[in-house]
Amino acid sequence: MAIDIQWIGDDASLAQHCATWRTLAFVAVDTEFMRVDTFYPIAGLLQVSEGERAYLIDPLLISDWAPFAELLQDPAVVKVLHACSEDLEVFLRLTGSLPTPLFDTQLAAGYLNLGFSMGYSRLVQAVLNIELPKGETRSDWLQRPLSATQVSYAAEDVLHLAEVYAQLKAQLSAEKYAWVLEDGAELVSNLCREVDPELAYREAKLAWKLNRQQLAVLKALCTWREGQARKRNQPRNRIIREHSLWPLARTQPDNLVALARIEDMHPKTVRQDGEFLLQLIKQAAATPAENWPEALPEPLPLDAAALLKKLRAIGQREGERLNIAPELMLRKKTLEALLKTGYPNGPYQLPESLRGWRRELMGQALLDCLAATGESA
């Protein structure tokens, strides 16, 4: 069946179509982008479908994204995407806006227990019994003209996305549908909370092993790395490789030879930024003790694994009862955050990351489990 494809390649046409789409109950949206050597994704194509035709927006020809931003933010129109974390970055970079309400078909599949973290082709096969052609995801989406295969692939993807949405929505209870939208809102909220360069050091590997003076150096290195990645529009590892951060902060080299010997240190980094890094390390190392960051908490000890397993079982039981993929119930990071509030002897507090329906449904059961474990210890 030939797909009805409509190209949108100027501001007036985009504005006109956005006005029409805002009268609909939903639109399926997809993006194709390039992100090989850049910090930010570069949009190559945006696709929209209402289930009847595929609209292909050429972002290289659009200068006014305000109408599309208004569509994304229109609370009356559900925006349907699949595994959308990178798509969200494209929207934010291109339009300054993020979709609300957001329905992620990958999440919806989990709520229907079709599978967790399902790839798009597999989901289309499971829901529509259609086998998609092998993807063009790795092709050059910034080339012009796009190949006939690329155009067909992009159009087919977004049209089927609208069809998948219709099928999944019909199977979801009103409660589960609301939960999918709730999780979508959390995805958007998490992206809005962009990493503060000043706090990037907390996520560095093995940071908890460093003393407070070494943490001051790590903080300076990570803050600079994050800022430079954005400024130069390069991946973080192009600025300083991840595995070099910890030994840099621990050993604090004071000459280029020592710097070059740091684990995983790229020669280009030494050539381009070596002198600056030595000065940065020297200054950070001399930070007065009262300004050192607080020591970071150690990871949970191995003997916490049994307790973690008990907590996870609560989510698995609820998942079975509700026929939801168990991986969607309680995230490992959330359970670890819960344990860290009081391990090993309590009292425990529910972490901020446990929110919404999960908190209401399982929060008290988690606390009760921990309290009972404490009594029996």
Image: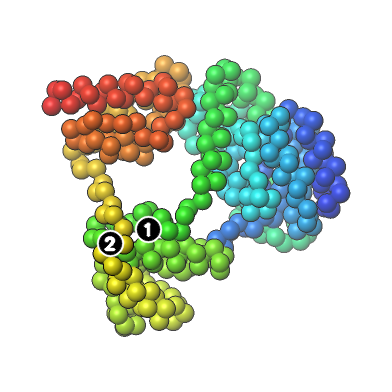
Please tell me which residue lies in front, 137 or 293: 293
Q: Residue at x 85, y 42 (%)?
A: 16
Please tell me which residue lies in front, 17 or 354: 354
Residue 232 lies, in percent from the top left, at 56, 68
Which residue is disc 2 drawn over? 290
The kind of residue on which mark 1 rests is Tyr
Residue 39 lies, in percent from the top left, at 55, 61
| 267 is higher (above) or lower (below) than 11 | below
| 344 is higher (above) or lower (below) than 44 | above
Q: Residue at x 31, y 58 (%)?
A: 293
Which of the labelled discs sits on residue 164, or is there none? none
Q: Can residue 316 be seen in this view?
A: no
Figure quadrant of residue 219: bottom left
The residue lying furthest to the left in this view is 377
Residue 127 lies, in percent from the top left, at 61, 27
Q: Residue at x 69, y 50 (%)?
A: 95
Compare marks 1 and 2 and give the one earlier in the sequence.
1
Asked which secondary structure carries label 1, the reply is helix
**What whole-number distance in Å separates the C-alpha atoms at marks 1 and 2?**
18 Å
| 195 is higher (above) or lower (below) than 254 | above
